Image (cartoon, helix red, strand yellow):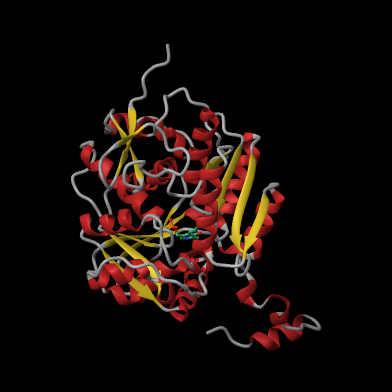
Amino acid sequence: MKKPEDWKLVCIGCGAAAETELPDSTCRQCGDLLEIRLSRGVDRKSLFETKGPGIWRFVGALPFSADIEPVSLGEGGTPLVRAERLASKVGLRDLYAKNDGQNPTGSFKDRGISVAVTRARTLGSKALVCASTGNTAASLAAYAARAGMNAVVVVPRARVASGKLGQAFAYGARVFGIDGNFDQALATVFDLVRKDSRFYLMNSVNPFRIEGQKITAFEIYEQLGRVPDFVVLPVGNAGNISAIWKGFKELRSGGVTDSQPKMIGVQAEGAAPLAKAALSGEPFRPLKDPQTVASAIRIGNPVSWRKALKAIGESEGRAVTVSDEEIMKAKESLAQDEGILVEAASAAPFAALAKLKLPQDARVVCIATGNGLKDLHDHGGNQRIETASGSDAIVDAIGDWH
Ligand code: F0G
């Protein structure tokens, strides 16, 4: 006989238990999002005594039995890099970048996608679908290939970084473009999974995605040797802030830690419906036409808005907005002061540091969510090459180093 599961799916709105996340990962009673509750608690021993690569060493905190064969490409276990030069520019002493751009397909999405594809395989799904601003598409395409499944991604036709699209094609996904933004792409995907049960939904409404992404909290705690005072990250569809907060909460409720970080969600000025609600105290209202240079977070109707506002509220954190100009300046500074190349969305938390005025001695972790190699068009490429007729020309052109 099959062992009863030691986790359950619960609605975050009305608290009703759900049998399954199928088809659209929302509650049959009230339509709100589902989350996974483990009945086994996490404790220090089960979490940190097993070593090994990536997220799957924490299988004790995931909704699977210990003998699960994961669909994995070695996701997680990314470096926590101290950023001293950047820290001194923004008046901090202890600043770190959790470099999730070093995941297998170059973004934090791999953590959650690995877990959700593993779940899809246990359900016998054959086709995986997501809406995406690019990174989820790339990640889903790779893990579907790894699992021998079909991948379908729906993207806003304009403004997806070409590197991300290229990844999706390279891994063999079918890519559909819509003449609209991410919010309309996600509505299309919801429609699709409700109509056609062959498709398994892979956006971060899927609570298995959140389980994979919560592991970031465990890694930060272990790498830092303590809970940071602040975790600062970009917010788009609002899955990652919800996930990382869930991870820190589980560490605390399992008695592993006795404190928690304040979660700071950063949005671009032109795409900030969540920050607007958090800052004004007014009810959340979706934004019709979000605009920002940070295409990954160009989202007006974040599906996990309620979870994200809870994360900010419960942790006594904040939301903040940054301009496109501030984002691009931070991206350059992160690359040139620290050697970390991120995409625009991932520079948003670093841009926010200048205006957050956090206490000088605070331990601050910014999540560098995605690798800048996917989106290099801002840097000018060939046009910026300087002409050198020989070595003397190079010496002349450079002059004195400052
Ligand atoms: N940073 C990057 C690089 C992203 O790609 C995303 C989201 C976020 C931050 C925001 O994370 O949605 O969990 O709040 N990208 C999605 C995608 C929407 O389709 O790749 P979130």
Q: Does 185 sit above or below residue 111?
A: below
> At x 50% / y 76%, what residue is drawn?
328
> At x 49% / y 75%, what residue is drawn?
291
Q: Is residue 19 left or right of residue 200?
A: left
Q: Position of residue 397 (x, y in %)?
A: 68, 87
Q: Position of residue 169 (x, y in %)?
A: 70, 53
Residue situated furthest top in the rendering: 1
Q: Is residue 105 visible?
A: no
For the residue pair 34 and 386, the one nearer the viewer reads as 34
Q: Quadrant of residue 282?
A: bottom left
Q: Position of residue 77 (x, y in %)?
A: 46, 44
Q: Is residue 24 visible?
A: yes
For the N terminus, the image quarter is: top left
Residue situated furthest left in the rendering: 258
> At x 70% / y 88%, what residue is drawn?
396
Q: Quadrant of residue 14?
A: top left
For the residue pair 147 and 191, the one nearer the viewer reads as 191
Q: Is residue 56 left or right of residue 159?
A: left
Q: Position of residue 215 (x, y in %)?
A: 39, 43
Q: Does 252 sit above or below residue 119?
A: below
> At x 33% / y 30%, what residue is drawn?
7
